[in-house]
Image (spheres, rainbow, N blue to C red):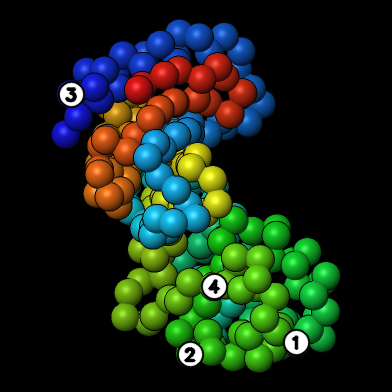
Amino acid sequence: MTAKITNAGVMECIEEMREKHTKDRKFLETIELQIGLKDYDPQKDKRFVGTVRLPNVPRPKLRICLIADAKHQDEAKKNNLDIDVTDLDTLKKFNKDKKLVKKWAKKYALLLASDTVLKKVPVVVGPILNRIGMFPTVVSHAEPLAMKIENTRASVKFQLKKVTCLAVAVGNYDMTNDQLKANVMMALNFLASLLKKQWHNLKSVVIKTTMGKPIRIL
C-alpha cells in the first residue's frame, strides 16, 4: 500500500471535513470520493470496471426499481422493502417509446430484474436501457431479496470511461468516522487492485460532502 494514504491520514481528513461542515442541510448529505488518475490513457489503456461491497451502506435511500416476477412481487410486499416494483405488463404500456422508457428509468439510480424476466426486458422495452447504461441487474430466487437490496445499496462501482476522473459515494453524514474510514479504505484498496500500476496510478483523492468543501486525502 502507498505510504501516502494511511488509516490515520484518512481519519484526519474525515475529521477536517466534519470541522468545515458548518451548515446542516434539510437532507442527508452523501459523502463522496473524487479520484484523479495519472499515467492512464482511456483511448489506449484497457478500461476497467469493478464493483465492491463496502462494509457500511453508504446510500440507504438509493432509489431502486425491481422488474419482478410474481414470486418476487410477493416477497417485496411481504418484507415491506423500500423499493419500487413493476412488471413486464406495466412496461409493455410504454409501447417501446424511447422517451417514455428513458423518463421512467432515469427516476432510479438502479434497475433490478428477476432472473425469470430479465431476457424479456429488451423484447418489451427495446434496446434503450442498454444505451443509457440502465440495463437491469439480475436477481435470483436463490438469495433473499432483502439481502440483495442491502448489498446493492452497499456497493460502489468504479468504471473508467473517457476521462480519468472517478467519483463514488462512500458514505453519508450520519455515519460514524470509523464507518466512513472503513468504507474509504475498502474503496481505495479495491480501486488500486483494478489499476495497472495500482497505487502509483492515483494522482489525487478528495473527500467531500454533497454541499461541503473538498478535503484532499492525496
Q: Looking at the picture, which amino acid does disc 3 mark? A: Ala
Residue at image point 64% right, 58% down: 108
Where 52 falls versus 179 (above or below)? below
Q: CA distance from mark 3 to mark 1?
A: 55 Å
Marks 1,2: beta carbons within 8 A: no
In this view, the mark in front (1 or 4): 4
Label 2 sits on what residue type?
Thr
Residue at the image point whose x is 39% and y is 65% from the top:
148
Near-viewer residue (64 or 186): 186
Numbered disc 4: secondary structure: loop
Q: What is the CA distance from the residue labelled 2 to the residue labelled 4?
A: 13 Å
In terms of sequence position, does the residue under pointer 2 or pointer 3 come before the other?
3
Say left or right for 148 vs 70: left
Spatial CA span between label 2 and label 3: 48 Å
Residue 6 marker: none
| C-alpha gap between disc 4 and disc 3 | 39 Å
Q: Nearer the viewer, residue 29 or 199?
A: 199
Q: Earlier in the sequence, mark 3 or mark 1?
A: 3
Q: Quick one: label 2 or label 4, which is nearer the N terminus?
A: 2
Residue that carries the numbered disc 3 in the rendered image: 3
Q: Nearer the viewer, residue 34 or 114?
A: 34
Label pair 2/3, CB-CB below 8 angstroms:
no
Query: Is residue 175 at all visible to an observer of this figure?
Result: no
